[in-house]
Amino acid sequence: MLLILRLLRESYIFAFQAIIVNKIRTLLSLLGITIGIFCIISVFTIFDSMEIAIRTNIDSLGTNVLFVQKWPWAMGGDYPWWKYYQRPEASLDDMREIQKRSNLSQVSAFMIGVSKMVKYQNNYMEGVSVMGVSHDFDQVLPFEINDGRYFSVIESMAGKNVAVIGNNIAENLFPGMEPVGRRITVMGRKVDVIGKIAKEGEDMFGNSNDNTVLLPINYFKSLVDIRDMDATIIVKALPLVSNDELRDELTGIMRSVRKLKPSAEDNFAINETSVITQGFDSLFKTIAIVGWIIGGFSLLVGGFGIANIMFVSVKERTSIIGIQKALGAKNYFILFQFLFEAIFLSVIGGIVGLLIVYILTLIVSSAFDFELILTAANIWLGIGVSAAIGLISGIVPAFTASRLDPVDAMRSSG
């Protein structure tokens, strides 16, 4: 232990002297390590932050929720859309049968939407997502109402002309006014606003309830013919019930409802959020490879720079090495001394690169509506890669120094 501490101390002193005496040479040599670590860790930081944000947004949909639809979700690969196009849409009758027959689901809801203009007096908004939802929609995809209330059972069943609106709609249609209790025009009909959804902001996919108007599905279908519209049945599993178990049950129910023969293919899709995360996993792996390639060239240059410093250091300290060996220093002591010095120099370059990445995360997070996070894993990765480059770059110079003849070394003028 004392030997290791002595080696670390002497290596630190020699490395520090190399930086002080040959500032320009050392800094230029370490620049490759700094740039390489910066490239790799900055790429990983950006995409780790994106991955965290994406997974958070996907998880907000619910990890124990399945979506019964016409179209399957897919990320890349072949997608036989012409086959899926012929499938029937999910319907309210399908949802009612699922509610009646399912023993593994906690709650189910129906959702369908169109993009329309909404209006209040002279104020209006275009491109608003007007959605017809069944009564239990707020239980499968929860949201917060900070003013007013959600639909009552009677309003949902009777198809009353009531609406719950998003924050942006409230601010644009009712500037400085209380929206609850007022009437808006949706698709030419007057609708009473009974609730306002709390401000959410857009997620990574641009989705938000801020620009949404929710209507009871039994009222919505009096405004629009929903038979040929893309619809979704959202099914939430009971606690301790896995998605696979619920999927198997829903598959059996839907095949029975659709009266499919045993040999017939499913004419419906049962989607879950893991499909999205798996697609992004492969994307992030590809990007990580690109990051390693970009940073790898800089690290290669940096490694040659560290090796150059160490060869010069061995040449300048040849006489000192001879004296150390004459006083009894073993070959491994000299070897480890130069190895530690190479690792120390390389880690300095890596730490500078990490520091630059950290400063950039602070700047980006404060300037944009996106939080960049330099994780502990990436910090340790940067330090570990730096140390590995130092070890690899210093092994040959260190071995050369350890094999010097003490007599010849002492005669050298350095």
Image (spheres, rainbow, N blue to C red):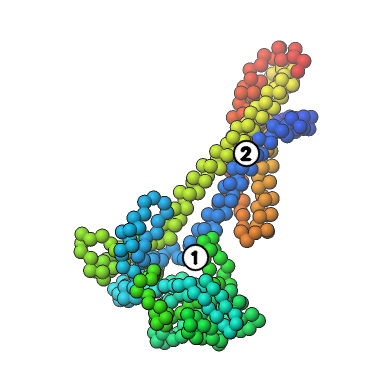
Q: Which amino acid type is marked by label 1?
A: Ser
Question: In the displayed structure, does residue 320 sit left or right of residue 214?
Answer: right
Q: Which residue is label 2 attached to?
A: 36
The residue lying toward the viewer, choosing from 236 and 5, is 236
Question: In the displayed structure, does residue 263 sit left or right of residue 407?
Answer: left
Q: Which residue is label 1 attached to?
A: 60
Position in image of residue 183 (x %, y %): 54, 86
For the residue labelled by badge 1, is the local secondary structure a helix, a strand or a loop?
Answer: helix
Q: Which amino acid type is marked by label 2?
A: Gly
Q: In which quarter of the image is residue 248?
A: bottom left
Q: Looking at the rendered structure, which numbered label has been put on residue 268?
A: none
Position in image of residue 69 (x %, y %): 36, 66
Position in image of residue 179 (x %, y %): 58, 83
Residue at horizontal 37 percent and vertical 60 percent from the top: 72
For the residue labelled by badge 2, is the local secondary structure a helix, a strand or a loop?
Answer: helix
Q: How far apart are marks 1 and 2 (CA)?
A: 36 Å
Q: Residues at badges 1 and 2 in contact (C-beta under 8 Å)?
A: no
